Image (cartoon, rainbow, N blue to C red):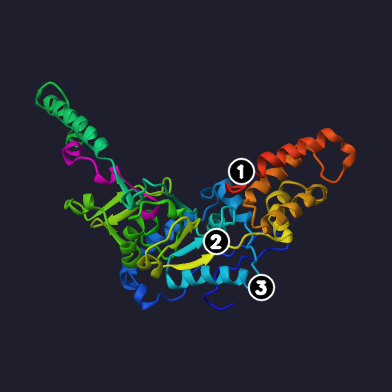
Amino acid sequence: MSDWKFFTGGLNRDGRPQQHPLQSITERPAWRQFMSTADFDQDWREASEQRWTELRSERRLDTRSRERGQSFRIRQAGSTGQSEILTAVNSALALRRPLLITGNPGSGKTSLAYAIAYELQLGPVLLWPITTRSTLSDALYRYDAIARLQDTQFDKSELELQILLAKAEDEDYDRAKIDQLKQGRSLGDYIQLGPVGTAFLPSHLPRVLLIDEVDKSDLNLPNDLLNLFEEGTYEIPELVRQKSAATVSVRTADDQLPANIAQGKVTCYEFPLVIMTSNGERDFPPAFLRRCLRITMPDPADSTVLENIVGAHFQREASDTSWEEVKQKVDPLIVEFAQKLQSKKSSLATDQLLNLVYMVRQSQLSVSESHDGQAKADELKALEDILLRRLTSDAGGK
């Protein structure tokens, strides 16, 4: 394996994705260096290594993220589809460039991010789901000015009380508490980094940042991302204006894992693996596209591919024997679903098939056993009508 092919998408003998922690990454291109190695080694490396020890602990990965990482399978489109996806992911890592992934709903765009984080053990995925109201500033950090004002007023009242007690000759007072109240609370207590802000913290390994459905954003958001993607740095004005402390501890998108901010400025050392998904509902400006690598996820229209996807989700829940029994029952459904996907008149997503397989398995329905009677056949038909409704309106939603 060459030194730039980090993500393989390979499976172990038991059918689970391989895991091999990313320890280091190729040398950064000269035009994608944001912090010098000397500055990082002097000021940030120790903190980064401690942070990654925590990020890679088992308790950091929630059950849903682990499931998405384990169940993803790279879908092949022709003879080169799989290699194109792997090449795009590894090129984005090596070149420190964002990866823009387009494809139909259910093609696995979002799950790819979790698969990469799972295989390379890059910690929990930092997720930023996009809506029409999303702004970059909110994804970088949030400053709770109201809470700070309330706490300041409370501390002022408490300070006045302590001073009055201090002036009373017959009362003891807490000098340390008075000094603490005069000093005030740390501004960092009221600042929390968002998923984007956390992803760009100085780190010797790249975090996985998933910007989901970026095509739903306001028209200006792609342009707002340009400077961050090009410069790898951002400022927190509230901290820049504060001159009393050079370094401030703030909360991050990682629970119970704060980070230090120096001089109110955050500059990444390793550019995060930024994965942006799009359903192709809009075009992006050329300046934005120029800064991204782009790949289209193929639709899993082949029944063998669909069978592997279904098996990846359900086989771990049962023994091999019971899974084979389920597989025999749902094989006709998978073949029929593949035929619908191959038809230009149909628009379906893979998770609809997973829903149908789950319900067939739960209700003990069988496609191949006619002796179950007309009642079960009608029940199966009703499930298919509900769960396999087309996503486009060209066929009346059925």
- N-term-proximal mark, 2 vs 1: 2
Q: Disc 2 designates what residue?
A: 116
- The location of residue 355, given as percent across then percent down, is 67, 44
On whether residue 306 falls in the magenta region, the answer is: no
Say which of 338 and 240 sits in front. 338
What residue sits right under mark 3 in the picture? Answer: 79
Mark 3 or mark 1: whose residue is earlier in sequence:
3
Secondary structure at numbered mark 3: loop
- Judge left or right: residue 166 versus residue 380: left
Q: Nearer the viewer, residue 79 or 112?
A: 79
Q: Residue at x 28, y 46 (%)?
A: 188
Amino acid type of the residue that numbered disc 1 sits on in the rendered structure: Gly
* Kind of residue at disc 2: Ile
Q: Determine contact: label 2, label 3, CB under 8 Å.
A: no
Q: Which residue is mark 1?
A: 397
Q: Quadrant of residue 209?
A: bottom left
Q: Is residue 339 above or below residue 184?
A: below
Spatial CA distance of label 2 from label 1 is 34 Å
Is residue 206 shown above or below 376? below
* Nearest to viewer (mark 3 / mark 1): 1
Q: Which mark is residue 23?
A: none
Position of the N terminus, as image quadrant, is bottom right
Upstream in sequence: badge 2 or badge 3: 3
Residue drawn at 33 percent across, 64 percent down? 232
Q: For the residues marked 3 and 1, what is the alpha-carbon distance in whole angstroms?
A: 33 Å
Residue range of the region highlighted in magenta in the rendering = 179-197
